[in-house]
Amino acid sequence: MSFVRRAATVLAAATALTAALAVPALAHVSINPGTAEQGGFTKVAFRVPNERDNASTTKVQVSFPTDHPLAFVSVKPVPGWDVKVTEGKLPKPVKTEYGDLEEAVTTVVWSGGKINPGEFQEFEVSMGQLPTDVDSLTFPTKQTYSGGEVVDWADAPKADGTEAEHPAPTLKLVPASGDDDHHSAASASASATPAAAAAGPSVAPVAAASTSDGTARLLGGAGLVVGVIGVVVGALGLRRRAA
């Protein structure tokens, strides 16, 4: 009987492990995709999950960098949400290939909508030209809940490499690929940027990666449980034959 109890304990532990693997990590406000090429133009989505069980997210405010300002910023309308794009005077003009930039977008605010508990919303932005002298841009974000709580996603990465409690959404910048086709596409994008900004970006399947990752972890955990069950059943069979 002690053998059976030990087997049951192992099985229960394996089941608990599978449940843990199936539960996603605590969600944070993030920018997706998280990487873009230096010197180019990109479209990103600010992904905002609702982390409260008793309140809805009713306002999202994203701050844009002023030390490395972006000359072109356009937003995609989100049904049910109002959007306000604010431009401000920069501390000092920034030289770009389009001339000196004295004003740039400083904040984008979405309000009037609702992200209910257990849901998330993506707010898409097209922007450029991305700087070439830094390897990342941060976008501090304030998330306001219906109860009045404001969560400030503005923490810098910790020195030891671990994640901060409220990390700021960060876009990593990598060197341009350098191939001829890329340069041709980048030049065409740059020349047509004002028109593209006015038209707004198209929808992209930004949630595919996280969905695939969660499915893989769930299947892996299920496989572990099946394996443990097989071992227990086999051991019980051997014990009966020995008896």
Image (cartoon, helix red, strand yellow):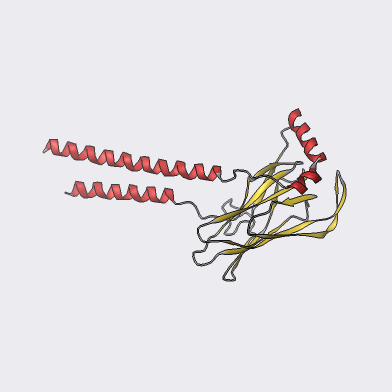
Quadrant in which the C terminus appears: top left
What residue is at 86 percent from the left and 57 percent from the top? 92
Q: Is residue 242 left or right of residue 174?
A: left
What residue is at 51 percent from the left and 55 percent from the top? 26
Q: Is residue 168 above or below residue 214?
A: below
Indicate the position of residue 17 as horizontal and vertical percent values. Answer: 38, 49
Decide if residue 179 is in sight here: no
What residue is at 36 percent from the left and 41 percent from the top? 224
Q: Is residue 66 above or below residue 205?
A: below
Indicate the position of residue 188 as horizontal and vertical percent values. Answer: 79, 36
Indicate the position of residue 211 as horizontal and vertical percent values. Answer: 51, 45
Q: Is residue 116 left or right of residue 107?
A: left
Indicate the position of residue 93 as horizontal and vertical percent values. Answer: 86, 54
Seen as rendered, the residue at the extreme left is 243
Count the marks.
0
Seen as rendered, the residue at the extreme right is 99
Decide if residue 32 is in sight here: yes
Looking at the image, which is closer to me, 233 or 126?
126
What residue is at 55 percent from the left and 42 percent from the top? 209
